Amino acid sequence: ISSIPLDKQVLWPGRCQMVTYMDTTLYLDGAHTPLSIDACIHWWQLMKAFDTRKKILIFYCSHERNPISLLKPLSIQPWDAVYFIPHLKHMRPSRIPVKTAYEYIQDANYPIIPTTELKSPPKQSWSETLGQLWQILKNNNTTEVYTHWNIEQALQHI
């Protein structure tokens, strides 16, 4: 067994990782639970404290996760734009049904007045559902929301 501490041997890309892309610093974190989202936000706030450039969130979670529990703490941060990207491959098979934004809002007992649009059957992509939940959590503020972009398109647009 090596005498080097385990944390010095392991590289975990996407966990509190900073990457330079063109003239932008990307702050990457693969947070996927409410606790890890909170840790990610704390890290990001420390790292971005003196950065005056635009704050852009690129987000994905699978439909097996509770998107409201992940998006709610992110929604109170000062983002200029948010990109909800699809999974790199098509959605994997799952026994868990994909819910509509309205069903997530109902399950969370979130205080909004349901609209016809929210009650309609899910004729939208998962990225659009995440975007709709974001708009509800942000009370339709002026954050730019993009839902039809893959990761490459989002990075080019930034």
Image: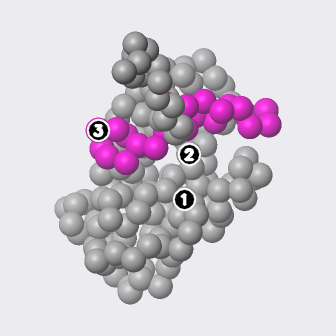
- For the residues bearing labels 1 and 2, Cβ distance under 8 angstroms: no
- Horizontal and vertical percent position of residue 43: 45, 26
- Measured as percent of width and height from the top left, residue 38 is found at 34, 35
> Is residue 72 visible in the rendered structure shown here?
no
In depth, the one of 138 and 21 nearer the eye is 21
First of labels 3, 2 by sequence position: 3
Work out which residue is located at the far front of the displayed protein and give it. Answer: 1
Q: Residue 39: give x, y in percent of width and height.
A: 36, 31
Name the image quarter holding the N terminus: top left
Q: Amino acid at mark 2?
A: Leu
- Tell me the tag on residue 57: 2
The image quarter in which residue 118 lies:
bottom left
Query: Where is 41 relative to 146, above or below?
Result: above
- The residue shown at (53%, 37%) is 13
Q: Which residues are magenta?
A: 16-37
Query: How many C-alpha atoms fall within 10 Å of the one at disc 2: few (<14), some, or many (≥20)?
Result: some
State the mark number for residue 84.
1
- Mark 3: secondary structure: helix
- Report the Cα–Cα distance between label 1 and label 2: 8 Å
